[in-house]
Amino acid sequence: KINSMQNERIKKLNSNNPLEGDYILYWMQASVRSEYNHALEFAINLANELKKPLLAFFAIYGRYPEANLRHFHFLLEGLDDTEKLLEKRKIKLVCRICDPVNEIVKLSQKACAVVTDRGYLRIQKEWRKSAAEKVKCAFYQVESEAVVPVNEASGKEEFAARTLRPKIHKKLDKYLITLPQGKVGASSLGLKISGEYFAPADFNISQLNNIDKTVFKSPRFTGGETRALETVKDFIETRLHNYDSMRNDPALNHLSHISPYLHFGQISPVHIALLIKNSDAPAAAKEKFLEELIVRRELSFNFCEYNDKYDSHESLPEWAVQTLEGRAIDKRPYIYEMDDFEKARTHDHCWNAAQLEMIVTGKMHNYMRMYWGKKIIEWTPNYKEAYKTAIYLNNKYSLDGRDPNSFAGVAWCFGKHDRPWTRRPVFGSIRYMNEAGLKRKFDMESYIQRVAKLCSDNNYELDSLTHLMEKSNE
């Protein structure tokens, strides 16, 4: 245990003891940052206790499910930044294109102990479990991606935010505290590691031969913890003060834009929450943002932790399945194929704008993502196909896709973490959204114009863009 570290964040994944070795190995995978990283700080403390250097390692896995050129660009920008920041703390970070489990087992042969961070997705759990079974030295997992450790907040899958919220609030004061940086004793910068390891700055993304390269690098978002912190501070200074009243308006784009950085572990939710809490913004604005950052986000962790079907329609509650299946025979007003959705070729300019915003920038406005998912349900032959379509598109183009928050967000469109509403065709008692409602609440023409300009400025050419540009000029 170290100062300001809660024991509940730490889990020993095997029964082995620390051994004689050359270093402590920190397997960095979910928490790609040098600050407010509980796993890193635990590893530093352990290294100091054993008077050993700390070696950090990141496995670049070219076959990570649904990861493409856009995702790897953002990841590698983050790794490059973190390597430089770790070097200032006398910690060496090396990478390798490899199967993570095999490489951890290999590197652990000269380690006293292995420390890793925690992820909540299936592949992340499988990696850690498999590695722990093969590593001969002590193997620790330290949770740093949740403010309140997931299993401490709840021991079961929660029905909705209202059932998880009081459990989190009850324990928030214990976990929402500053995490000081430990001072590194023995430097690892001079360590010689045999094998094909490299620093992130020396990596060329063309070395990843088998990844999907059709999704281009985001022109809007640059990865890295330095940029993440700048983004949070800009949000606090310019948009937090009226976040509670303006966050839902697509025309205003009044969001924090930190979800890509949270997904890649480039900034800590604890760090963000403390910055927000200590700001001079109105209490209502801070409360709304912290509700989304902590309760809503950690509801998605709870979902993935306790529901192994989190990326499938099989994760939906029984009432939602029954109502959707009960309306299966209803006539859809429009039916679109996957190619129509992907290329934003629908009759709805608002939906097309949302899809194009995601394609071009790697992120969609939060409110529009709800509308986007609802319309996919309405324009697809059945809800099972709609679910697959929404997951595919979001995972492919969003920098914050392939994430518990995204999986829970898609599931919400289909009734997860929600309640029954007035019955309607196609939707049954699933919550309904329509274009008329958007236009009644917001200046959607301004949103469409903004997205059209984004596309044009970034030379994104598509048939749907032509129609969008024409619409914005009407």
Image (cartoon, rainbow, N blue to C red):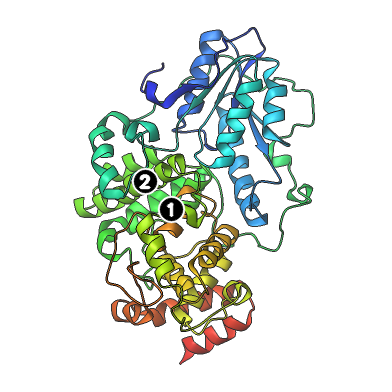
Give the secondary structure at mark 1: helix
Quadrant position of the C terminus in the picture: bottom left
* Residue denoted by label 1: 408
Bin the neighbour count of mark 1 within 10 Å (Cα to Cα): few under 14, some 14-19, many 20 and up: many
* Residue denoted by label 2: 299
Residue 296: x and y in percent read 34, 49
Residue 461: x and y in percent read 64, 78
Q: Is residue 447 visible?
A: yes
* Chain-order first, disc 1 or disc 2: 2
Q: Amino acid at mark 2?
A: Leu
The answer to which of 422 and 373 lies nearer the viewer is 422
Left or right placement of residue 269 versus residue 441 in this view: right
User: Image quadrant of residue 437?
Assistant: bottom left
The answer to which of 283 and 126 lies nearer the viewer is 126
- Image point (31%, 45%), residue name: 276
Give the secondary structure at mark 2: helix
Bin the neighbour count of mark 2 within 10 Å (Cα to Cα): few under 14, some 14-19, many 20 and up: many
Query: How many circles with numbers are drawn on the protein?
Result: 2
Callout 1 touching callout 2 (CB < 8 Å)? yes
Residue 197: x and y in percent read 75, 31
- Image point (52%, 31%), residue name: 117
User: Image quadrant of residue 435?
Assistant: bottom left
Asked if residue 331 is positioned above or below residue 267 in the image, the reply reads: below
